[in-house]
């Protein structure tokens, strides 16, 4: 796994700003998986890339604090500080409430890192819960977006360390999300294999090019299967294509 991920980073990295390892793919391997994850994160940092740990963490405050230590912080022990993964950002699940979410956002801020909160995800089942109408009006994802927007407003500068996961498969919602979260960076999954298109996401980039971060996995890793090129060349070409599409908005 380490070799595979390293090869993808070497091939596509020059056209990217970050890598987004899916923590479950590493954690299923137990302790060796965490070793591989650490090695991949180190390889990405050596290549000048940011590391976004995609684990969608969310739990009661004590557990949330431990997740923060594991991903972007460190843990004090009688034998000294034990450093965690050293990620630059991570994804978070808000559905246990603001009290748990703020523990994660506070951990990110202390580490000068970022957090991307699930607002409206890219999977088809997002409509089952996230699109539910609320009694007071609006949809559930709009309520979550308003919470994220409020947390982001506490940061200085045009963009906040508190970002949002905004699925590219429902582009009709992106403009409304930008209204609710004007200072949040949008992490935009669902481009490529899930059917999302960069060209439909212009409102995400209203604050500037740094306002949105397009994420694609399978469409980059498996690009050679349709292009007929080598895996490395296919991955680099697809990453370059997505970058050009985002810059054209």
Image (spheres, rainbow, N blue to C red):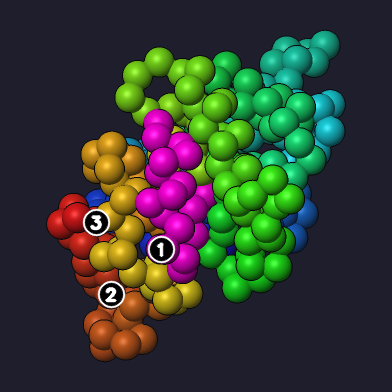
Label 2 crowd bin: few (<14), some (14–19), many (20+), radius 10 Å: many
Residue 158 vs residue 63, the one in the foreground: 158
Q: Position of residue 229 (x, y in %)?
A: 25, 82
Quarter of the image containing the N terminus? bottom right
Q: Earlier in the sequence, mark 3 or mark 2?
A: 2
Label 3 crowd bin: few (<14), some (14–19), many (20+), radius 10 Å: many
Q: CA distance from mark 3 to mark 2?
A: 19 Å
Quarter of the image containing the C terminus? bottom left
Q: Which residue is mark 1?
A: 171
Q: Which residues are magenta?
A: 165-183
Residue 218 vs residue 14, the one in the foreground: 218
Is residue 62 something one can see in this rendering? yes
Q: Residue at x 47, y 74 (%)?
A: 194
Q: Which residue is mark 3?
A: 246
Q: Residue at x 38, y 51 (%)?
A: 175
Name the element at disc 1.
helix
| Residue that extends furthest to the front in the rendered view of this protein | 136
Q: Position of residue 49 (x, y in %)?
A: 36, 42
Q: Which residue is mark 2?
A: 234
Which of the 4 image quarters holds residue 198? bottom left
Residue 108 vs residue 85, the one in the foreground: 108
Magenta span includes 175: yes
Name the element at disc 2.
helix
């Amino acid at each position: 796994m380490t070799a595979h991920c390293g090869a993808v980073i070497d091939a596509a990295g020059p056209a990217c700003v970050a890598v987004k390892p899916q923590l479950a793919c590493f954690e299923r391997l137990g302790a060796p998986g965490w070793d591989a994850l650490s090695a991949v994160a180190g390889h990405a940092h050596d290549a000048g890339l940011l590391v976004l740990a995609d684990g969608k963490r969310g739990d009661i405050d004590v557990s949330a604090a431990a997740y923060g230590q594991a991903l972007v912080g460190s843990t004090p022990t009688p034998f000294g500080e034990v450093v965690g993964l050293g990620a630059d950002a991570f994804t978070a699940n808000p559905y246990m409430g603001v009290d748990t979410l703020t523990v994660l956002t506070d951990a990110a801020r202390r580490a000068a890192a970022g957090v991307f909160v699930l607002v409206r995800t890219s999977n088809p089942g997002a409509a089952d819960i996230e699109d539910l109408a609320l009694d007071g009006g609006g949809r559930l994802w709009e309520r979550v977006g308003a919470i994220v927007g409020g947390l982001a407003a506490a940061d200085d500068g045009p963009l906040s360390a508190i970002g949002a996961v905004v699925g590219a498969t429902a582009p009709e919602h992106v403009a409304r999300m930008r209204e609710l979260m004007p200072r949040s960076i949008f992490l935009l999954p669902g481009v490529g294999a899930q059917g999302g298109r960069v060209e439909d996401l212009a409102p995400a980039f209203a604050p500037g090019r740094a306002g949105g971060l397009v994420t694609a996995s399978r469409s980059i890793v498996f690009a050679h299967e349709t292009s007929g090129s080598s895996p490395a060349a296919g991955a680099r070409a697809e990453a370059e294509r997505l970058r050009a599409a985002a810059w054209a908005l």
